[in-house]
Image (spheres, rainbow, N blue to C red):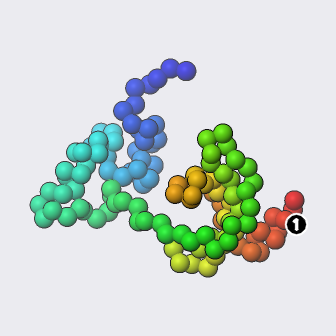
């Protein structure tokens, strides 16, 4: 497979998708590097501009109950089924990869009690 010469992974996507999901872009539609974006955002009053280029908010979670481990990778990450409260909301069943001691998490899926029951029925 040959390399096409994109400067950043976000440049693989059409301009409208890059703007919507990846943030600020120059007039040609290429992703600006992080340093130039931060400098532009902090011009003037020393505060970051609102709108494009926003940072994601911190995600808070509390594992209410550790139900079980589905599998473990060779690198020590475990796919677990837990009951988790995200950002203080009602707890949901959660299937997700976790590093040891739950200090890092991978992609996962959350299910309400009804969705978990339906999944059990389907399986």
- Sort mark 1 into few (<14), some (14-19) or many (20+) by Cα contacts within 10 Å: few
Q: Looking at the rendering, in which quadrant would you find the N terminus? A: top right
Q: Look at the picture and state if 57 lies above or below 41.
A: below
Residue 28: image location, x then y, percent: 30, 39
Residue 11 appearing in the image: yes
- Determine the residue positioned at 52% across, 55% down: 104
Left or right: residue 19 compared with residue 42:
right
Secondary structure beneath label 1? helix
- Determine the residue positioned at 33% across, 39% down: 30
Residue 29 appearing in the image: no
Q: Which residue is mark 1?
A: 121
Residue 41: image location, x then y, percent: 22, 56
Residue 19: image location, x then y, percent: 39, 51
Left or right: residue 17 compared with residue 25:
right
Quadrant of residue 110 within the rendered picture: bottom right
- Determine the residue positioned at 46% across, 41% down: 13
Residue 25: image location, x then y, percent: 31, 46
């Amino acid at each position: 497979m040959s390399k096409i010469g994109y400067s950043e992974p976000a440049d693989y996507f059409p301009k409208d998708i890059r703007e919507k999901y990846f943030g600020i872009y120059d007039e040609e539609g290429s992703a600006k590097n992080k340093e130039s974006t931060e400098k532009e955002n902090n011009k003037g009053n020393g505060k970051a501009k609102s709108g494009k280029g926003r940072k994601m908010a911190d995600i808070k979670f509390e594992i209410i109950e550790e139900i079980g481990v589905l599998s473990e990778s060779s690198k020590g990450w475990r796919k677990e089924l837990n009951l988790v409260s995200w950002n203080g909301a009602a707890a949901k069943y959660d299937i997700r990869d976790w590093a040891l001691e739950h200090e890092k998490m991978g992609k996962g899926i959350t299910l309400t009690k009804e969705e978990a029951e339906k999944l059990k029925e389907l399986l």
